[in-house]
Image: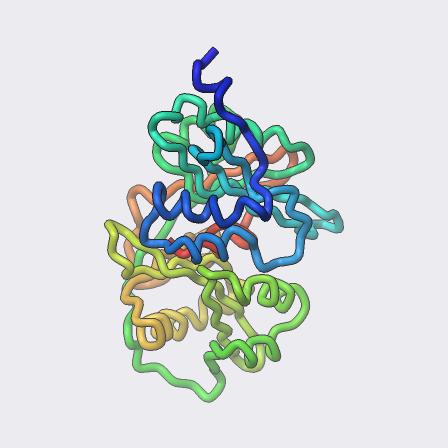
Amino acid sequence: MNKLAGSVNLLPITSADVHAVAEFLHAHLNTRIASAEWEAAITPPWACAQPNHGFLLRAGERIVGVHLAFYSERRMEGRTERFCNLAAWCVIDEYRSIGLRLLNALLAQKGYHFTDLSPSGNVVPLNSRLKFFHLDVASALLPNLPWPIWSPRVRIISEPGEIGQILRGRDLDIYRDHAHAAAARHVVIVKDDVPCYVIFRRVRRKNLPLFASILYVSDRALFKRVAKYVFRHLLLRHGIPLTLAELRVVGVRPRPSIMLRSPRPKMYRSANLRPEQIDYLYSELTCVAW
């Protein structure tokens, strides 16, 4: 038995722990994210019973490891499906040998589909051994160009009040659930009075915050016709010069673009859900702006 295991307690992260967990993640995982930002991100803005916020390892009064989780309930084919999104995982070096206890505790929870949408390099083979599947993350990289296009039939809507008025049904629910998510950015493109709702986030590559990553597209066929308006909006409104577009999200490869040789992996574990039923909503991708 690992000598450290007996001196360390494995505990669920409760609301009372959130402040201390946020300080731990700021100090040990990502100092670019302030403790207050971590604290706000840990509790998601959507309504759902959260059995915990993940699990932590505590040596005495000291937190030595954390694995965050975001929970959600989704309606799919007439059923309510419960999801657990595995998020930030950090264990200080001295306790790395028992860090797997955190993941095992999360996966031991019954009745959930699990997603891991930002696994680090050494976590990917571990997930594979634990029966996670890879999602097809084929991705295009394209420049956001100031296309000289205009049409009275096309409108770009990005003001929160207007978005809330134009969307209906499931997309309105998604918007309300994510309107205050720290990493999610929202835009609606309306063509001939038909809306296409897009959620994106700003991401870093090689430590450069120059990229938008598209997380959700409500109407892929319409997006194909209005994509240039979206990419121009990302450049002119948000100052983002490049976009990463997964084909499973946007539908078809935008032009002009290049395909990434090694896109970052995303994984899931489920007994019965198909890959096309897995998306990136209700997850750390919408809540944590790293």
Q: Is residue 34 visible?
A: yes
Question: Residue 251 appears at what percent x and percent y?
Answer: 47, 57
Residue situated furthest right in the rendering: 78
| Residue at the image point whose x is 30% and y is 54% from the top | 204
Question: Residue 45 appears at what percent x and percent y?
Answer: 58, 59
Question: Residue 166 appears at what percent x and percent y?
Answer: 60, 78
Residue situated furthest bottom in the rendering: 152
Q: Is residue 196 above or below residue 288?
A: below
Residue situated furthest front in the rendering: 61
Question: Which of 55 and 264 lies nearest the eye of the viewer?
Answer: 55
- Image position of 37 (left or right of 178): left
| Residue at the image point whose x is 31% and y is 50% from the top | 259
Question: Which of 204 and 1 lies nearest the eye of the viewer?
Answer: 1
Q: How many numbered markers are drawn?
A: 0
Q: Quadrant of residue 125?
A: top left
| Residue at the image point whose x is 61% and y is 58% from the top | 46
Q: Is residue 277 visible?
A: no
Q: Is residue 253 above or below residue 4?
A: below
Residue situated furthest top in the rendering: 1
Question: Residue 138 appears at what percent x and percent y?
Answer: 39, 47
